[in-house]
Image (cartoon, coloured by chain):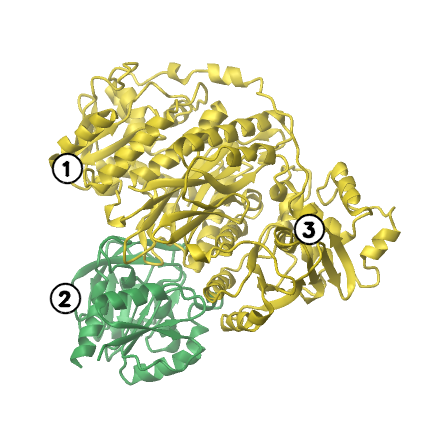
Chain colours: A yellow, B green
Amino acid sequence: MTIKNLDTVKHAAGTPDVDQPWKELGLKEDEYLRIREILERRPTGAELAMYSVMWSEHCSYKSSKVHLKQFGDKVPANDAMLVGIGENAGVVDVGQGYAVTFKVESHNHPSYIEPYQGAATGVGGIVRDILAMGARPVAVVDPLRFGAADHPDTRRVLPGVVAGIGGYGNCLGLPNIGGEVVFDPCYQGNPLVNAGCIGVMKHEDIHLAQASGPGNKVILYGARTGGDGIGGVSVLASETFDDAKPTKRPAVQVGDPFQEKLLIECTLEIFAEKLVAGIQDLGGAGLSCATSELASAGSGGMRVELDTVPLRDSSLSPEEILMSESQERMCAVVEPDKVDRFMEICEKWDVIATVIGEVTEGTRLEIFWHGEQIVDVPPRSVAHDGPVYHRPYARPDWQDALQADDANKLARPASPAELREQVLRLVGSPNQASKAWITDQYDRFVQGNTVLAQPEDAGMVRIDESTNLGVAMATDGNGRFAKLDPYTGAQLALAEAYRNVAASGAKPLAISDCLNFGSPEDPAVMWQFAEATRGLADGCLQLGTPVTGGNVSLYNQTGETAIHPTPVVAVLGVIDDVTRRTPIAFAEEGRLLYLLGETREEFGGSAWSQVIHDHLGGLPPAVDLDREKLLGEILISGSRDGMIDAAHDLSDGGLIQAVTESCLRGGKGARLVVPDTLSISGSATGDAFTFLFSESAGRAVVAVPRSEELRFTDMCGARGLPATRIGVVDGEEIEVQGEFSIPLSELRAAHEGTIEALLV
Amino acid sequence: MTTRIGVVTFPGTLDDRDSLRAVRIAGAEPVSLWHRDKDIKQVDAVVLAGGFSYGDYLRAGAISRFSPVMETVIEQAKGGMPVLGICNGFQILTETHLLPGAMLRNNHLHFICRDQKLRVENAGTAWTADYDAGQEISVPLKNIDGRYVAAESVLDELEAEGRVAFRYLDGNPNGSLRDIAGITNAAGNVVGLMPHPEHAVEPLIGTGRTDGLGFFTSILKKLVSA
């Protein structure tokens, strides 16, 4: 657009009847009319661009807001919370003057269109979110979900996603310490690429995204603005895929990890000298988001000279500059007398920095293009007062039939030989197999503080070398459970992540979530979302772990087919002394194996039902969050007091999966005995099948030194946690007495070869 | 006087803090060096740490070798100052021709991060004196451009002169010729390797072994006794 036909505020006021492309930009008619109402005229092209991206589902949470409110209403008493929902990321106190910020976000749609760049910029975006809070990023995690492992398109998407995460993350110098890789046909056209990051700072270093203090300068720094990612949050992330429409590749951003690394170091140096009054990263919705959110959270007034923005492509129009999601950019608000020093630090790191505007006395966000005003809006109306929808929701009519299709009725192995064969099939199935081929493409050692990383239950990093203070994180989700019952499924994801953190020896403190669902315009999906958020909010209240923030990804569906509802939960824990951490490896012969918790006949949504019968039906395992809490306390005490030297949570695949992983990790076998009773309530007597494959929640297997056995069982007895001795670490095979034995070499071949064979 | 060991930070260097820590744990004084400064602050030895300097967009190490700090490092290395290049540092050393050969993309084309077993072939360099020749150690390996190549005649010369400092054991991770993981110059003061000894200096962290600490104690002893 040339300056001649520039759609200025003045021009817009005089031409009310101009036809505007609100529909192409992803707005609904009533939304467009509301913008006209707010402005009391038609919006300019630039204003329309800003509203369209900021009022997108991705940025405005317009369908999810009414449900997410619960996370603020049902807040458990927890004095660790320093900054709650609404900022770039939540912040919790971890003691010794340290604060930790963490968050999980989705980059699902871009990663399907362009796997490498989609996944790479997902990492970049979450890292900048953490950085913008004032923290040094210290670790990343990546929960990933793909279509069927043997589907041809998975061979396109998965290697690209993994290379993108590695290619970007490895260049930033952030250890990748955890995550998940799950395959299910429901994710075929809608892979879930979630990315989490943890950052550490001192309490006094917390920074917030707000522009206050008239006269303060607005500085855009980092990469130049290009034409990539225009409409990423609106036309790409907030619509379902449809074969009939043209490709959306231009809406995917392109990343430059080297630039991001410079941006990290440069920003941390700027923080150290206390040079910023407010800061915001540029991610989804780019400058539209950064300027409107900074102004809205501050006193309101901001003036921006948009033509000062450094560009990669000089032909970009003001609308495109406002909507561009070019990566590796940050926006800071700086007091005038600190601008020179700010610029010096940027120069030191070869980072381009430009004063693009200033905070003003007024209450309007005003944007100019070569002296002509093209935006004049109340920033709150763009950033915070977007539309809110009470979408209709209804329990789908197929839910009853699904739940009635009981997995406990499926044919079970009839002989020890068949049981043995099913064990090998299970531990070698894509979801249960080793993911080392994937995670070995990520640097887990950089920064020299990694205490635990995949395939451990939780990732753990040391944050203070002198005191050995550390933090742990686990991410979990199970779309199959959530499909059977979204409320319980969300709580099972929470319980599993909580249990994983506790099994590593860390105390769970708070959570972040990434809620991946289908289209909110489908009442069945909306019901799943409502149930899952209700389950998660209730669960967090009961466990005492507040939700600090997170992300909602809707429209994960192709045509009428939605993904399984997939709430992914990241639990953050703290450990006072990382030398007390508990690994999963059974590395010492003679250690006694104890099964903690109760095992019931629970096979609905289980890995066994999927692998052996390709079945999904019935009810997911029951959740008892008080039991989870007790189990967590026992695991943490056992670690702190040296009573256990290995622990592994029991989840998908059940006991045999956990024991297999622990044995292979430690290089030692195990002899197991099927106990007489599996449950104190007596609902399951000790049959080998249930013992090995049940996915009852609230369980873990631990390795106890003989010298600690009495002390450990006394503790469990006194606290009322069922603890059953099930065997011993021994030999070079896993033997289930009276049933079968499998050499570790055979298990290793089954467990470790699967992924590479499918993908290489 | 304490022994001062410098660690260079280029834009895109990632393991500089780890190397500084390893120097400190070994008992020397760590000194940060900046790529734009020719002044290397009178350090007694220099570590070029791992990472992706300048993004490695052109060719790993190709741009860093022209930085001001490298002018001084090259000059002093030729005069005998000990220099250790780890991963990207090794790549930079080959670009400067302080060490022969070059690094190509791994033969499987993927980034690989794993615990790697090595054999110390030459325990006579400034950086390996605390090991025994033939000693097997395990340190993390993590790179995408780690395949060491050189002309056959160069490889023969390296072998003949005992300048292959480290060899991969239990599987060549990247297609490096003759399983070479690291080499030394003829004088034994300049050593480069792809695996990361600075990530294996504390019992709890990373792989849980301290097999890499010997690099840093070797240099410290050499400098103290010199």
Question: Which residue is depicted at the point 16% across and 41% down?
Answer: A588
Marks 2, 1: nearer the viewer: 1
Q: Earlier in the sequence, mark 1 or mark 3?
A: 3
The residue carrying pointer 3 sits among few (fewer than 14), some (14 to 19) or many (20 or more) residues within 10 Å by Cα, namely many
Q: Give the residue at mark 3.
A: A379
Find residue A676 and report its horizontal and vertical position in percent: 20, 17
> Which SS class for mark 1?
loop
The residue carrying pointer 2 sits among few (fewer than 14), some (14 to 19) or many (20 or more) residues within 10 Å by Cα, namely some
Q: Chain of mark 1?
A: A
> A437 left or right of A589?
right
Total number of numbered labels? 3
Find residue B201 and report its horizontal and vertical position in percent: 24, 60
> Which SS class for mark 2?
loop
Q: Give the residue at mark 1.
A: A705
The residue carrying pointer 1 sits among few (fewer than 14), some (14 to 19) or many (20 or more) residues within 10 Å by Cα, namely many
Question: Which residue is depicted at the point 33% across and 43% down?
Answer: A455
Q: Chain of mark 3?
A: A
> A519 left or right of B12?
right
> A328 left or right of B79?
right
Q: Give the residue at mark 2.
A: B132
Instruction: Identify residue type, mark 1.
Output: Pro
**Structural distance between the alpha carbons of marks 3 and 2:** 68 Å
